[in-house]
Image: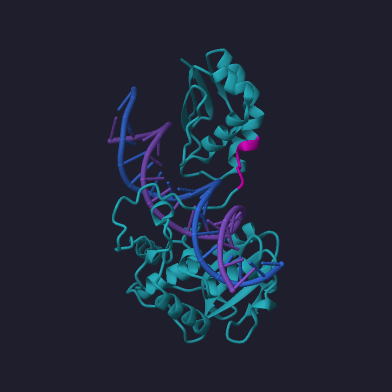
Chain colours: A cyan, B blue, C purple
Amino acid sequence: MIMNEFQVFDPLKDDVNTVPALSGNYIFALRKNSRLPDIGIPVTYTKFRDYDVIYVGLASNSLKDRDIKKHFNGNAGGSTLRKSLGCLFGYNLIPRDSHYNSNGKTKFNVTDESKLSDWIKTNLIMFYYPNKEFDSVESLLIQALNPPLNLDKNHNVINSEFRKHLTKLRNSKPNYYYNNTIENSNQNNLGKELYVKIWKGYLPIILSAIKCKQKTMTLDRSLFESAGNRKNSGYSFRLDIANGIVPRKSGSAVARDLKKVLDKSIDFKTLANKKSITISLNTNFELIVQVI
DNA sequence: CGATGATCTTGGAGAACGCT
DNA sequence: AGCGTTCTCCAAGATCATCG
């Protein structure tokens, strides 16, 4: 069983260099007699080797370098764990750097970050497991351990109220000088163009549909569903293309990946020149191509 | 060259929108 | 009103840049 593979790392005793610079997963838990700051909402913990788990994560490159060190020392702008803990402590978020308006990243002041580092060292203990299947292992860990500080991918009913409140705390805007528009702060991460391959396969048909001016075709939904997981948000989109310029749809990975394929196709550029083309995919996986 | 810091990217959830 | 579509926001790093 996977759970047996984890090694312990005690920040008070162990050298960071004992953690390998390999990909893998890690678990943060409270030491005995330690507890998370009380925000008035009870938290239910799941134990891992008799310790209450608070957070699990993955390191796709190096457990030691990028991720662990960031959690124990960096700042909240690079560590989800630090940011969540600081918010629970009631520290004020401030812009992480001069690009706050575009990246939306936040951290705490030097004093608070330092207090946080001390608290983490004395109250938390970590377990790590170097492996290559970190994505699926992470899902397993979240399911099995229901860590209260894991917000993404955590749909457990237990602690949902706590997580909702934590999300709110994390999203409180810095009240400093940055009250001028905080729009377009699209910062985020992960992923590998899940749908590009599929669209490459469909490109010839799409091109011929454009030549026909109007065509509807049903795509293989299983291709999309096995590539990504959009059970709730769906796969549908609509792209209005003018003069070969394909708009970027920030909310739809499916549409974004089609844009990538179209943008790379010289044949498409030639065909789309001086035309208005609409490509849409509905929930029945019918791809509708229209040329005006 | 490794550590640290700054910037960029992706997929997903759910709210808002808008058509019939 | 209902439901499909689009928009907005967010989690969680990945990657690029810089510094000692």
Identified at 58% across, 23% down, the residue is A269
User: Is C2 situated above or below A277?
Assistant: below
Residue B2 lies in what quarter of the image? bottom right
User: Is A125 situated above or below B4?
Assistant: below
Looking at the rendered image, the quarter that the N terminus of chain A falls into is: bottom right
Majority secondary structure of magenta residues: loop
Residue A128 within the magenta-colored segment of the rendering: no
Q: Is residue A54 left or right of residue A37?
A: right
Task: Tell me if residue A144 can be seen.
Answer: no
Residue A196 within the magenta-colored segment of the rendering: yes
Identified at 70% across, 60% down, the residue is A132
The residue lying toward the viewer, choosing from A110 and A128, is A110
Identify the magenta region: A192-197
Identified at 67% across, 63% down, the residue is A23
Q: Is residue A4 left or right of residue A268?
A: right
x, y percent for residue A241 = 48, 25
x, y percent for residue A99 = 42, 56
